[in-house]
Image (cartoon, rainbow, N blue to C red):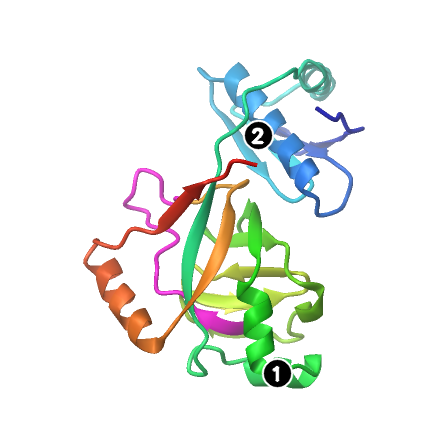
Amino acid sequence: MKFYKLKYKRFGEYSVLVEWPSKIDESILENILLFKSEIEKKYINKKVYLKNSYNSLLISYEKKINYNTKISELNNSYKKIGPVKKQDFNTWEIPVCYDNQFGSDLINLEKNLSMNKDDIIYLHNSKEYRVYNIGFLPGFLYLGGLDKKIHHPRKEKPVLNVPKGSVGIGGSQTGIYPNTSPGGWHIIGNSPINLFNINKTSPCFIKPGDKIKFNPISLKEHELIKIQVESNIYKPIKTKIND
């Protein structure tokens, strides 16, 4: 396993922020998730809250911490990570309808990217995306791997009500809005499935490290899957990742 030179920062009286090199990289994500797993094992009988992003891990404890002591403990734990069992991740197939009634920003993207709508859609669903982080809303997936040809800056003025299930492009990322909310990404389609359900044991069935494959569907297929989701009979397709 590759070891990185980590930066440790005080984050209030209860937390420590650990930072890796500032870039989107799968090897960094793997390193973060391994460290996260190591901490979870150490604190298995204690409460500790862990939240990772593209290049950082926020560790929050129940009680106020001695900052220097925690830094030393964390650094020692990181250095002691040895050969580990490969973590299990899945590729999830997410149905997306790119019809004009859902892709409200496709026309503007055609113009700004000087590209045909069909080409934008093809480039979007022809790749698999790694899940790097889940936020800013519960179940909102930050996905890396978007083709550079369809990178586009976020909107200068966010929209107040982006519909649930909207699939959008924001900068070098793509993602899915799990609920209706404000947002500044360019919307190109809609998925009828639920990415977050508070009534489930695991509210979000997808986790950082998994992959997403967008499958284009028609309007009729979108309506059918939506009915299946509402009837609790829809099951997303997953495949175990062997790489």
Residue shown at 77% from the left, 44% from the top: 22
- Give the answer, above or below, for where 37 lies relative to 105: above
Q: Position of residue 104 (x, y in %)?
A: 50, 81
Figure quadrant of the N terminus: top right
Provide the residue designation for mark 2. Answer: 60
SS type, badge 1: loop
Q: Position of residue 8 (x, y in %)?
A: 75, 29
Nearest the viewer among 102 and 62 is 102
- Decide whether the magenta segment is chiefly helix, strand or loop: loop
At label 2, the amino acid type is Ser
Q: Position of residue 122 (x, y in %)?
A: 56, 71
- Looking at the image, do the residues carrying marks 2 and 1 touch, with CB atoms under 8 Å apart? no
Q: Earlier in the sequence, mark 2 or mark 1?
A: 2
- Give the answer, above or below, for where 119 lies relative to 51: below
Q: Position of residue 70 (x, y in %)?
A: 68, 18
Provide the residue designation for mark 1. Answer: 116
What's drawn in magenta, residue-wise?
185-205
